[in-house]
Amino acid sequence: MEAKTSESLEKLITLLKPPPIPNSQPPQSSANEKMPTVLLYIDEVHSAQTRLPGDPKHRTNYSALTRAIDSFKSKALLAIFTSTMSRLYELAPPQMVHSSARVVGNDAIPLPFWELPFDVNVGKMSRSRLTLEEITSTAHIVKFGRPL
Amino acid sequence: MLTKRHAQDGYPPSDREVVPFFKQQYKNFDSARLAFSLFLGYLFDQVTKLVDKDHNLASALGWRDWLDRQATQGNGSNRDDLYRRVLEEVNLDVCGYFSTRVGVTSYAAYKEIVNRLKQTALEGPPMVISRA
């Protein structure tokens, strides 16, 4: 099953990658090849904290979701989980008490962002008159610099 | 246009279907992982089809604007339509999987599972949270 899902993702990545520019030189670094092409964004992820019945490791749906996404780790995919709930310690517990042995003692695992500011660029916004349609457009909203 | 339920708690109708899918109790870890893998697979398939048809959707901006637009067929926005289709496919596939794994052989039992999954998907959100 995961192989099929991985194949679906590969098709999407291939489709989304910009075509090479004619007569251009290949990228110098392999870093560009590892840049994410697909951004998977899951909001309100605390909804997936349902405990799995009888699971000896006390895992939740969220654990199963991250395991499903983990099968794409070699792909150009970046997954971001966000939540407005403050009980994030249940989603990102300290390494030492994590249910996965791969996480315990693995310093390569990024720490979660616990608190993010809101509208960080609002002071830099121009005060020009805008129509209601312009204010509600994505192009305008992204100028606020909201991390969420 | 905001629906009555949307206006009350800020959740778009698509969340009303997707949130219960991620919240529902699965039989065990492997069942949950399978359901989420299927969801992602069908989501990638649907997005691939859409981008292949209209390459403007390949950019984050184009994609976001498309999601918010009214669907040409069916009710609600393209976002609602997309997630409804993905969940329908997942539910049917999960039922097919369980029918082979746990020996659900009768059509009545099969329909029972489909109906139960649909019922779960139609339940409201787990809690009301004001969105940032």
Image (cartoon, coloured by chain):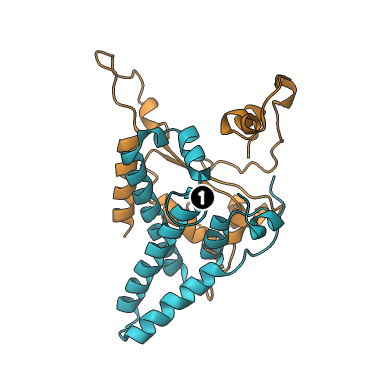
**Subunit bearing disc 1:** B
Q: Mark 1 points at which residue?
A: B77
Give the percent coordinates (x, y) of residue A95.
59, 51
Quarter in which the C terminus of chain A is drawn: top right
> Is residue B99 depicted above or below B7 in this figure?
below
- Crowd around label 1: few <14 · some 14–19 · many ≥20 (10 Å): many
Q: Position of residue A129 (x, y in %)?
A: 71, 22
Q: Chain B is drawn in which colour?
A: cyan
> As rendered, which of B103 and A28 lies closer to the eye?
B103
Asked whether B125 or B22 is in front, the reply is: B125
* Quarter of the N terminus of chain A within the rendering: bottom left
| Residue B43 screen position, x and y as percent | 40, 52
Identified at 38% across, 46% down, the residue is: B47
In the displayed structure, A68 sits above or below B88; it is above
Chain A representation colour: orange
Residue B99 or residue B131, whichever sits in front: B131
Identity of the residue drawn at 58% across and 66% down: A50
Where disc 1 sits, the SS reads loop
Residue A2 vs residue B112: left or right?
Answer: left
Q: How many numbered markers are drawn?
A: 1
Identity of the residue drawn at 47% across and 52% down: A102
Report x, y in % for residue B97.
33, 72
Q: Which amino acid does label 1 sit on?
A: Ser
- Quadrant in which residue B101 is drawn: bottom left
Whether residue A34 appears in this view of the structure is yes
Examine the image and state in which quarter residue B13 appears: bottom right
| Left or right: A145, with B94 as reference point | right
Report if residue A106 is visible in the image: no
Q: Nearer the viewer, residue A49 or A110?
A: A49
Give left or right: position of B6 versus A70.
right
